[in-house]
Amino acid sequence: MKKILLLNPPSRAFNFSRDYFCSKALKTHYVEHPIDLLVLSGILTRQFRVDILDATVLNLSSHDCFRRIKDFSPDIIIFLSGSASWIDDFNFMKQVKEANQVLKIIGIGDIFFNRDVIVNHKWIDAVLLDFTSRDILHYLEGRYDAVKNMFFRNHEVVIFTEIAQYHKEEFEIPVPRHELFLRGNYTFPFARRLPFTTILTDYGCASRCLFCLYNTLGFKLRKLENVFEELEHIHSLGVRELFIKDQSFGHDRARALRFSRELVKRDWRFSWTAFSRADSIDLELASNMKEAGCHTLILGVETANEGLLRKFKPGLTLEKIDNALKLCKKLKIRTVGTFCLGLPSETKESVLNTIDYAIKSGCDFASFNVFVPKTGTVLEKEFLRHNVDKKLIDREWDQSGMSSISGNGIISEGEMADLLSLAVWKFYFRLGYAFNRVLDLTSVADLRMFLRSGVGLFRSMMSRKRSLTPE
């Protein structure tokens, strides 16, 4: 039986999250499960011997990671990369390939949607653009006529297959092998209990946010009975904390209600965090989610500028956001507001307004990121129009702003770095914030995550400041 290694490469100065076509340097000392590798562990396990090597969560050096790869002696490596870390990732993987020329190397990540990447890097045998499909099996079986959602080499020729655009189709996946990932010390700042694990009940996104890659994937829904089968397995492992990685949980309201009510009925007593949209949340849905164990919702706010919000996140308004935040506060569901600073055409004054809004909004947590161009998104061309001297594949683009930062053609890179630091300091280090968070703690694990996140956030901000300061 051939051996497949699912690999999250080693990180350098910053720990990098590479996951679900998104990559960024982590602001605090936590590492989430890479959902793409988790899903693939189930798809591949019946036909291959599968193992996971997450060099980031294990804090492995390149040398130690290389040694472990050699000890496992895989026939195939499926590795993660992304726009925030691709240069180091590629250098490392090229060395792995040079040490074993017959090794097949397959990449996953946002960086690979640019066709030039596989063309220019001949050590890459294939890239996978939908980790929930059976395409990877068709490819590894040599059934190239059945392959979609992949770019791959057939001898010296690169084949670019059709990329599916889903429209609410249903799909199923084999139960992922969560037990492999429980060996790693994965942590999550919003988890109430540890260990936790991550699940996916849909794929892509039905929203039309212009700066985001997920809506370009289309949107398909996993059959709920298939989800409950996975949850039964997770429950049998003794895990009671979940991160639902759907990009807009609740978009299909009836489905989200059924999911929540079924969790209550089966009495698994999971507690969980999910992404959602403010305009998807109403009293009935939020109440059912709360009863089913949802304690934290991550909501995309992005900007306090109504004009930019209408343009870049169609259908959402500040009024809808305010209403959702107040509803969650009433039901005692914690909220995480995600903000995207420096959108195309945005000014410094607009960013400052967004920072002030984040503080006044009532969000329990805030995640401040900076706009970076994503291959295939509507805003890719707009960014390049304002930055004619830049190419998408000429540097690393980190949306967290930790390892690298970008201006938007109006706000300079230096100003953007200062605004990001200001946002974090004003939100998290204001008088009374820590006191309110302590009052919200419900468990020893919660306390540990609070302390770890706070210390990690402070240290990472200091590291980012040092890394971005010119010599």
Image (tube, rainbow, N blue to C red):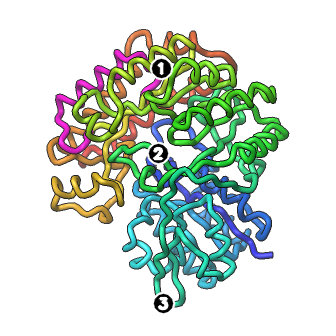
Q: Which of label 2 and label 3 is nearer to you? A: 2
Q: CA distance from mark 1 to mark 2?
A: 26 Å
Find out whether the residues at labels 1 and 2 contact each other: C-beta distance under 8 Å: no
Could you tell me which residue is drawn at 23 percent across and 26 percent down? Answer: 352
Q: List the residue tagged with mark 2.
A: 206
Q: List the residue tagged with mark 3.
A: 156
* Residue 65 visible here: yes
Task: Looking at the picture, tell me which residue is in the foreground, 466 or 114.
Answer: 114
Could you tell me which residue is drawn at 26 percent across and 41 percent down? Answer: 343
Residue density around tag 2, few if under 14, some if 14–19, many if 20 or more, within 10 Å: many
Q: CA distance from mark 3 to mark 1?
A: 53 Å
> Magenta span covers which residues?
342-366
Residue 416, position as x, y percentages in the image: 24, 39
Element under label 1?
A: loop
User: Which numbered circle lies on residue 188?
Assistant: none
Task: Looking at the picture, tell me which residue is in the foreground, 86 or 340.
Answer: 340
Residue 293, position as x, y percentages in the image: 68, 24
* Residue 6 sits in quarter: bottom right
Amino acid type, callout 1? Asp
Q: List the residue tagged with mark 1.
A: 364
Q: CA distance from mark 2 to mark 3?
A: 37 Å
Mark earlier in primary sequence (2, 3): 3
* Image quarter of the N terminus: bottom right
